[in-house]
C-alpha cells in the first residue's frame, strides 16, 4: 500500500491502529514529492528535518495527530519562509505563526511544506508566481488554477494528504475544481486570518484542500474558532462539522441559480454539472430554480473592492522594516519607490494602481462607494434565495484548466475566470468545490468542479450535501497519472 | 465615472515607478477594466447602504493590557538594515 495515496481519514485510521507511524507517512510523502514534484512544481520549500522531529513525538490520538499538512506560502509559520510568491518577500522568515498553524499544531498536525501561488494570491492560474511555475497534475501543459494552485496540485497529485489555501474571490474553489480535489471556503469570520498575508481583508478566508468531503470537515473542525488576534473572527459555539456527514439528503431543497447556467460555459462543464443536479434529484433532493439577479455585477464589484483593499494592504511593503530593499537609493522616497517597483510583479502593480485609482479623491464615490452598495444587493440576493432553499448548486468554473500562457496577456479575460466564485466572498457565505466528472480535452481527461454554496455558518449542511453526492459517484477516486 | 485613468500619476500616488512599456500596457488594460466596471452605473443604488464587510461586527474592543509579544531582536530579524536595535533608513531631513 502506498501511504501517500491515502485520504486524511484513512491515514488517521491506520495511524491509530498502529499499522503505520507518522514517520512512515512523512517518508511516503517525501518520496512521492521527490518523484513527481519536479513535474508539478507545487512546493516552494519544505522542511522535512523539522517535520521528522515533530512526527517522532506526535500523539496520534489528537484530532489530526501525526498528519503532515502543506501550507500555502502566504500563511506564516514561525521560522519558515513566507514569500507570497513575491520577490519582495523572497528573503523573509516568519517571526510568528498564524493562528491556523497554532491550531493545526495543537491538534497534532505537522505543517511541513510551503506551496506556490499567484503572487500575493492575485490571479487565477498561479502563473503570477514570481518564483516558480506550477502545472496541473492532469495535464502538465495546463495551469492548476489559482491563486492557491500549489495547494490544489499537491493534493490532487498525492503529494499531500491535505493543504491550506486562502480564498478571496475563488482562490480555493477554482483550483480545487481544475485539479480535481475538494476545496472549501468557510463563512467569513469562521477562521482566523491572523498570520495570513492580507490581500483584501473583507474577503480573505483560509480554508482546506482535501481528497474527500469528510476530510474537509475534519480540517475545518481544527481551523475554526474565535481568535482575539483577529477582530473579524466570530464568537460561536464550537461544533463538529462532520456531524451531518453520512446523513441522507431526502427532502432538502437545492437551488439552481439561473444566472450561473448561462451561455459561454464550456459544454462539457455544463453537461457534468447538470448531470450532478440530476444525481441530487435521484438522491431525493428537491431542485428549485432560483434567481440571483445581481450576479452579472459581481466581477465588477470585486475588482473595485479587492483592488482598493489590496492597495491599502500592500502599502506596508516599503523596504524599511522587512522585505526587499532597493540598493543605492538617493533618499527615503526613492527607497520606497524603488523597493516596491523592483519587488512587485506586474499583476500586483496593476491591481495596486487600479485600487489606488478607485480610492482616489474624486473617484471614491463613483467607484468604491457604488461598488460597496452593489455588494449589499449581491448579499441580499443570497439572503432571499436561502429563504427558499438549503443550498445552491452551480459550476465552480465556467471552463476546465487552460494552457499555460494562454491568458497571461489579457487581465480582463483572466478576471472573468472567477465569475462563479466571486459573489460568495462578497456575500461572506461558505462555498465548496468537489469533483463532478471529467471533460475530454485533446484526448486527456480534465477535472470538472461542482460548486455548492451554503447559508452563513451552515458549513455542516454543506458537507452533508457534498458528501452525499461524492459517495454516490466515482469522481473522488480518480487520480492523475504522473 | 470616467476612463481618464492617468496611470503614471496614479502609480506615483502608490509609490510605484513604471517603465514606458508598463505605462502603455497598463493604460490599455486598466482602461478596459474601467470600461467593464461602468456597468455598475446601470444599478439603482438609491437608499442602499454600503457593505464594508459581510459580518455584523462593529467596533471590536479589547482590554488595553500589556502582553508578551516580539522581543526587539525578533521584531528586527527581517529588517534590511539595522544597528543598536534600530532600523537604518536613508537621511530624511537634508
Image (cartoon, helix red, strand yellow):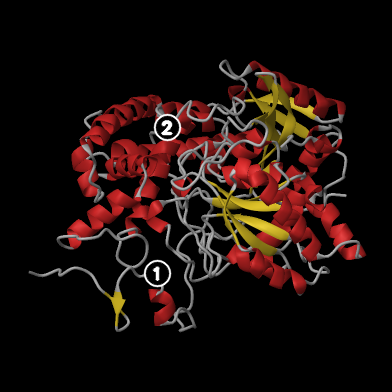
Residue farthest to the left?
B94
Q: Is residue A479 left or right of residue B38?
A: right
Report in which chain the residue with disc 1 lies.
Answer: B
* Residue A184 horizontal/vertical position (percent): 66, 46
Determine the image quadrant of residue A371. top left
* Residue A228 horizontal/vertical position (percent): 55, 70
Pointer 1 residue: B78
**Which residue occupies the foreground of this view, A387 or A52?**
A52
Dot 1 alpha-carbon crowd within 10 angstroms: few under 14, some 14 to 19, many 20 or more: many
The residue positioned 30% from the left and 36% from the top of the image is: A366
Depth check, mark 2 against mark 1: the one in front is 1
Can residue A297 be seen?
no
State the SS at label 2. Answer: helix
Q: Is residue A342 left or right of residue B91?
A: right
Mark 2–mark 1 Cα distance, whole angstroms, equals 37 Å
State the SS at label 1. Answer: loop
Can residue A419 be seen?
yes
- In the image, are marks 2 and 1 on the same chain? no
The residue positioned 77% from the left and 44% from the top of the image is: A212
Q: Which mark is residue A300?
A: 2
Dot 2 alpha-carbon crowd within 10 angstroms: few under 14, some 14 to 19, many 20 or more: many
**Which residue occupies the foreground of this view, B66 or A328?**
A328
**Which residue occupies the foreground of this view, A365 or A103?**
A103
Point out the image quarter for the C terminus of chain A: top right
Count up the numbered dots.
2
* Residue B61 horizontal/vertical position (percent): 47, 70
Q: Is residue A261 left or right of residue A419?
A: right
The residue positioned 87% from the left and 45% from the top of the image is: A246
* Residue B42 horizontal/vertical position (percent): 38, 24
Q: Which mark is residue A90?
A: none
Amino acid at each position: 500500500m502506498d501511504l501517500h495515496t491515502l485520504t486524511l481519514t484513512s491515514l488517521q485510521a491506520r495511524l491509530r491502529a498502529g499499522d503505520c507511524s507518522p514517520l512512515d507517512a512523512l517518508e511516503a510523502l517525501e518520496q512521492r514529492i521527490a518523484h513527481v514534484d519536479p513535474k508539478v512544481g507545487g512546493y516552494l520549500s519544505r522542511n522535512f528535518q523539522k517535520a521528522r522531529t515533530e512526527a517522532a513525538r506526535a500523539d496520534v490520538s489528537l484530532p489530526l495527530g501525526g498528519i503532515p499538512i502543506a501550507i500555502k506560502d502566504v500563511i506564516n509559520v514561525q521560522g519558515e519562509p513566507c514569500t507570497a510568491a513575491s520577490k519582495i518577500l523572497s528573503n523573509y522568515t516568519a517571526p510568528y505563526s498564524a493562528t491556523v498553524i497554532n491550531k493545526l499544531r495543537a491538534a497534532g498536525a505537522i505543517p511541513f511544506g510551503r506551496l506556490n501561488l499567484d503572487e500575493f494570491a492575485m490571479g487565477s492560474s498561479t502563473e503570477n508566481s514570481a518564483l516558480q511555475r506550477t502545472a496541473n497534475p492532469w495535464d502538465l501543459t495546463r495551469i492548476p488554477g489559482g491563486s492557491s494552485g500549489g495547494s490544489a496540485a499537491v493534493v490532487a497529485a498525492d503529494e499531500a494528504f491535505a493543504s491550506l489555501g486562502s480564498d478571496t474571490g475563488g482562490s480555493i474553489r477554482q483550483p480545487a475544481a481544475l485539479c480535481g480535489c475538494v476545496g472549501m471556503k468557510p463563512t467569513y469570520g469562521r477562521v482566523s486570518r491572523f498570520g495570513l498575508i492580507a490581500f483584501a481583508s473583507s474577503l480573505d478566508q483560509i480554508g482546506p484542500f482535501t481528497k474527500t468531503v469528510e476530510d474537509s470537515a475534519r480540517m475545518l473542525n481544527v481551523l475554526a474558532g474565535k481568535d482575539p488576534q483577529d477582530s473579524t473572527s466570530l464568537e460561536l459555539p464550537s461544533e463538529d462539522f462532520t456531524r451531518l456527514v453520512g446523513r441522507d439528503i431526502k427532502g432538502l431543497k437545492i437551488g439552481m441559480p439561473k444566472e450561473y447556467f448561462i451561455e459561454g460555459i464550456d459544454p462539457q462543464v455544463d453537461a457534468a454539472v447538470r448531470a450532478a443536479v440530476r444525481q441530487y434529484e435521484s438522491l431525493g433532493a428537491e431542485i428549485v430554480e432560483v434567481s440571483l439577479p445581481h450576479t452579472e455585477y459581481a466581477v465588477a464589484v470585486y475588482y473595485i473592492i479587492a483592488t482598493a483593499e489590496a492597495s491599502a494592504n500592500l502599502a506596508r511593503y516599503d523596504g524599511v522594516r522587512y522585505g526587499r530593499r532597493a540598493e543605492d537609493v538617493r533618499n527615503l522616497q526613492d527607497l520606497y519607490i524603488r523597493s516596491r517597483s523592483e519587488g512587485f510583479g506586474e499583476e500586483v502593480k496593476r491591481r495596486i494602481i487600479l485600487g489606488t485609482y478607485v480610492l482616489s479623491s474624486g473617484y471614491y464615490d463613483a467607484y468604491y462607494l457604488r461598488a460597496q452598495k452593489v455588494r449589499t444587493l449581491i448579499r441580499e440576493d443570497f439572503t432571499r434565495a436561502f429563504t427558499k432553499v438549503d443550498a445552491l448548486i452551480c459550476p465552480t468554473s465556467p471552463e476546465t484548466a487552460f494552457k499555460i500562457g494562454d491568458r497571461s496577456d489579457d487581465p480582463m479575460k483572466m478576471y472573468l475566470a472567477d465569475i462563479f466564485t466571486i459573489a460568495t466572498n462578497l456575500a461572506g457565505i461558505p462555498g465548496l468545490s468537489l469533483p463532478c466528472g471529467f471533460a475530454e480535452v485533446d484526448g486527456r481527461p480534465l477535472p470538472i468542479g461542482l460548486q455548492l454554496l451554503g447559508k452563513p455558518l451552515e458549513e455542516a449542511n454543506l458537507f452533508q450535501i457534498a458528501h452525499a453526492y461524492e459517495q454516490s459517484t466515482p469522481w473522488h477516486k480518480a487520480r492523475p497519472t504522473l | 465615472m470616467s476612463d481618464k485613468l492617468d496611470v503614471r500619476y496614479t502609480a506615483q500616488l502608490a509609490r510605484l515607478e513604471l517603465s514606458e512599456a508598463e505605462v502603455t500596457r497598463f493604460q490599455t488594460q486598466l482602461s478596459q477594466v474601467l470600461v467593464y466596471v461602468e456597468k455598475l452605473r446601470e444599478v439603482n443604488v438609491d437608499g442602499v447602504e454600503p457593505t464594508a464587510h459581510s459580518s455584523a461586527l462593529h467596533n471590536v474592543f479589547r482590554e488595553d493590557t500589556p502582553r508578551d509579544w516580539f522581543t526587539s531582536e525578533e521584531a528586527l530579524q527581517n529588517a534590511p538594515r539595522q544597528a543598536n536595535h534600530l532600523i537604518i533608513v536613508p537621511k530624511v531631513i537634508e
